[in-house]
Amino acid sequence: MDFLNAIHYGYTQENISIITDSIDRLINSVGYYHEWDRYNEIEDYSEFKSECNNLIERSIKPLQKQHNHGLTIKCTTYFIQALNGLDDEVQEWLDDVYTELLDIIESELNKGSQQLRKDTLDWVLHWRNMLYCDLSPLLTCCFKDTDSLLLIQEDLLKELDEIKSKRSEEEERIEAYATKLMINLIDSYPDVMMSYDDFVKRYDGCGNVKLDHIQRLMNQHQYDPALQLILSLKQKELYGSFNDQLDDWLIEIYEYNHDLSHLRDIYYDRLMDFHWGINMKCYHVYKDTFSELEWFNHRDTIIEQLKDRSNIDEVYYKENMVKPLMIMVKDSPSASLLLKYTSLLDSFNHQAVLELYQHHIEMKAAYAGGKDHYEELAHLLDRLSEFKDGQTIASQLANNIATIHKARRNMIAVFKSHHLIN
């Protein structure tokens, strides 16, 4: 494989960038997360797992035999960072890989000098990319001595102090990971690290610290102090990126207190937040905060506010609002809505459904296309013929279309394969 050859070349040149670029190519091949991208849809990770195992067996482990402890540690640490953020579907496999990679790092540290341990810790802490993932397993596994832990604490506190005044999206992410790492170390080594209360007091203005504090209060069912903290954060635009998490906690508290009025407000805000479409799960939960009579009186108002959303048809369907759904189906340039809602529409106005099928068939037949286009046209004719009184209409339409557009050989062939014409 090219990336394996590149890694071997990197080892001989002791060029960390060649090695890390090769690891990046491997990770990116399965849709690794970038700031501007989302995960790709991955159905089978088997090949990726195989390549990762090859990288460990054919590259990292042989490097150990060269006794280049520093480069081995750097490559292995980078690999751990690169794997961070992959799909939860491979979490069990990732845990095994992390364990193997951490064992390699710990083994190399034990073979090397105290200076190597110090240099490695310094490299990890000052390589900002490493702060984008949870380093707790690495640091708590490989740097358990008091001096290292205090050095980690000093560096993390310095990092958090420096970004207090910086509110960029990048700094907020680093702050989140640094805070999580610091709190994990405080919980793991309470006799060495500063106390949790002192940490919270020192970074009272840090949103991530407050989030952790709220989470602890929620876990202990201390809902009143948690509610006060959440509401104080909600008033500050600075913490807007945390709103979903804060709302989740508010929902838990309001449900516990049976506070339907406040629950309704949260779900309304969430429903209105989806400008490109309607979150139907949120719609149903919002509706459930009303009694049947209340919803009957309120429904038209909320639907009026949502009518321009791309999937308003789903609301019409759920509410059995046939008239606006019928108009939407007729005005749609595609027959997909008609096929989707045929049963509901037919139960209310059978004749109108027959006319809608005829309308969409004539629209699709008006222009030429490839085989897929004609298959879709034939499918509509097939569906029309399934109605008891639609067989004659479908047959007449098919023959008329075939007569008018007899030069469309692909269409004629498709119609014959569907037995629509002789």
Image (cartoon, helix red, strand yellow):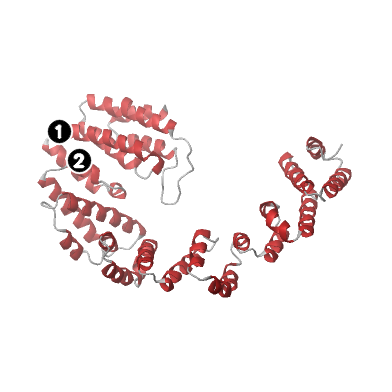
Q: Kindly identify which residue carries mark 2.
A: 141
- In this orientation, does residue 310 appear? no
Q: Is residue 153 left or right of residue 313?
A: left
So how many labels did they put on this image? 2
Q: Nearer the viewer, residue 275 or 64?
A: 275
Residue plotted at (19% across, 45% down): 122
Q: Is residue 76 left or right of residue 188?
A: right
Badge 1 marks a residue whose secondary structure is helix
Which quarter of the image is occupied by the C terminus?
top right
Q: Which amino acid, by three-letter code, is at mark 1? A: Asn
Residue 224 occupies quadrant:
bottom left
- CB contact under 8 Å: marks 1 and 2: no
- In this orientation, does residue 254 appear? yes
Q: Residues within 10 Å of mark 2 (few under 14, many from 20)?
A: some
Residue plotted at (79% across, 58% down): 351
The label number, if any, that marks residue 110 in the structure image: 1
